[in-house]
Image (tube, rainbow, N blue to C red):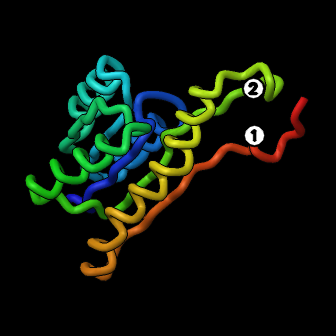
Amino acid sequence: MKKGSVLITGASGGIGEEFARRFAEDGYDLILAARNEEKLQFLKNELESKYSNNVLIFPFDLSVQENVEKLYQELSVKKINVDILVNNAGFGLFGEFTGTDLNRELNMIDLNVKTLTHMTKLFLGGMIQRNQGKILNIASTAAFQPGL
């Protein structure tokens, strides 16, 4: 028996990929989003062959807010409820502030802050209506490390 659906952002590697494996092992259907389509497809094939889960992939750059909306709309059209949202997509920049690229910094803010907030706002309403759901927001400890 399926336990529900889990949407994991940043699912093509690292913590997101490991979350996908654990939730698949626990019997959840998966919705995996990340920029790297090749890695997502490989993970989908691996998980579907090992477990009897349904795995949907969305190779979207979620720092682009239109893609966040597109993901939400596609799931809505397919009538897929997200029972667990794992907001894991994100990245960090290192170096002296004056030496880092402004556009990369703004892209980082878009993904790490705006996208997390946007995803939570979109999916939380359905969870409240169904009186069930969970959201896990993953953040880096790099925010607490001293700068240069």
Percent x, y for residue 17? 44, 34
Q: Residue at x 31, y 64 (%)?
A: 83
Percent x, y for residue 56? 21, 39
Percent x, y for residue 50? 27, 32
Mark 1 or 2, nearer chain start: 2
Amino acid type, label 2: Phe
Percent x, y for residue 114? 49, 51
- Which numbered dot is residue 94? 2
In the image, residue 124 sits, relative to residue 139, either above or below, namely below
Residue under numbered circle 1: 142
Q: Nearer the viewer, mark 1 or mark 2?
A: 2
- Which numbered dot is residue 100? none
Towards the viewer: 19 or 121? 121
Towards the viewer: 111 or 129? 111
In the image, residue 121 sits, relative to residue 31, either above or below, namely below
In the image, residue 136 sits, relative to residue 147, either above or below, namely below
Q: Residue at x 28, y 60 (%)?
A: 82
Q: Quadrant of the C terminus?
A: top right
| Residue 16 seen in this snapshot | yes
Quarter of image, res 66: top left
Quarter of image, res 32: top left
| Residue 21 seen in this snapshot | no
Please state if 23 lies on the left or on the right of 2 as rendered. right
Q: Are marks 1 and 2 in contact (CB under 8 Å)?
A: yes
Please state if 96 lies on the left or on the right of 33 as rendered. right
Amino acid type, label 1: Ala
In the image, residue 18 sits, relative to residue 148, either above or below, namely below
- Count neighbours of disc 2 (C-alpha within 10 A) and say few if under 14, some if 14 to 19, many if 20 or more: few
